[in-house]
Amino acid sequence: MKGKQTILAAAAIIGTSTLLFQGMVQVVTAANYNKTDTVPTSYAKSVDAPSQTPQNSLPPGYKKTNYTVKAMNNQMPTSKDITKEAAAEIGAKALWEIYALSLEGKVVEMRYQQPREDLPRAQWYGEVIINDKLNYSFMIDAVTGEYFDMFRERTFIEKETYDEELAKNPQEYVDLAKKAAEKYNIVHGPVKSAVYKIQSMVENNDPLMSVEVTGENGEIATVYIARNDKEFIGATYHAKEKYKDHPNAKIYYPKSAEPQK
C-alpha cells in the first residue's frame, strides 16, 4: 500500500497556525530510516515507574488470538530487547483495549529500530493492515514495552481543506482529547490541562486536531481527534514526548498526524 512503509519526521516544536502549518516535514524512506546511527541507551534516568509498563497487564475481555508476526527490516534486537513476538503481543493488547481490535487471523508487521540521537531508546514498531482504507500501528520501547505511539489510519476519498474557523475555536476537540486521555489512561492518571496545538491535513483526507495533554503527575502526551467525526485516532505518549526538547529532536509521528508544509 502506498505510503505504508513511510516514516514522516517533523520538527519537534510545532506551533498553532491560523492558515498554514508551522514546522518542517521531512519524508524519510524506510531504507533511510534503517540507516540511523546507533547511540547509547541510558534507561536508569529515562524509564518510568514499572507500574506504567504494560507487559503484564491484561485488558478486560482480551484473549490471545492467532496472528502472524512478520519481521519487516534487518535490524536485529539486542539481548536486552524484548522479542518481536513479545512486542507484538503488547501491541495486540493495546489495540484491543483502545480500539477493540482483535488480531485473529491478522499479520503484525514488526520493525526494530536501534536508539537514535533524538530518541535514545530502542523501539519496536508494529503495523496491522486491515485494507486499503484502514490500518493500525503502535510503537513501544524495545526494552520496557512502554507505549510511544498508538494510532489508527483511515483513508477517505473526499478531499478536505484546512478549517481556519475551527482552528480559532477548537474547544470541543480539546474536551474530547481530555476525555480520551483519561479513558485510555494516556498520562497514567487524571488530566491537569489540555491545549490545542495544530490541525493536520494529509493525503489520506482524515484531518486531525492535535491536543497536548498534561497529567497531574507531569506527564505530557499528544492526543489526536478526527476533525470530521470526532473519533479518537491515537496518541503519542510521554515516554516519547519527553524527548521533543532534545536539540536534534525530530518526533516521528504516525503518518496521519503529520502536518504538511
Image (spheres, helix red, strand yellow):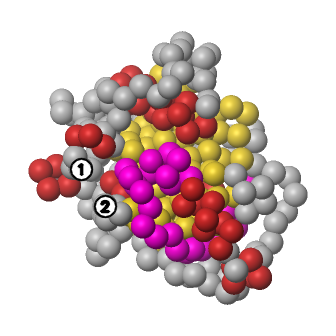
Q: Is residue 31 above or below residue 196?
A: above
Give whichever of discs 1 and 2 has the lower sequence position.
Answer: 1
Label 2 environment density (alpha carbons within 10 Å; few <14, some 14–19, many ≥20):
few
**Region of the chain picked out in magenta, as a range:** 180-208
The residue singled out by tag 2 in the image is 217
When the figure is inspected, residue 246 is found, relative to residue 63, above or below; the finding is: below
Residue 180 image point, x, y percent: 56, 53
Q: Secondary structure at mark 1?
A: loop
Specify the amino acid type for callout 1.
Asp
Q: Is residue 15 left or right of residue 231?
A: left
Instruction: Identify the residue at image location x=68%, y=31%.
Output: 130
**Relative height, residue 104 to residue 252 (above, below):** above
Residue at point 69% right, 52% down?
A: 231
Which label belongs to residue 48?
Answer: 1
Q: Is residue 212 magenta?
A: no
Percent position of residue 89, x then y: 43, 25
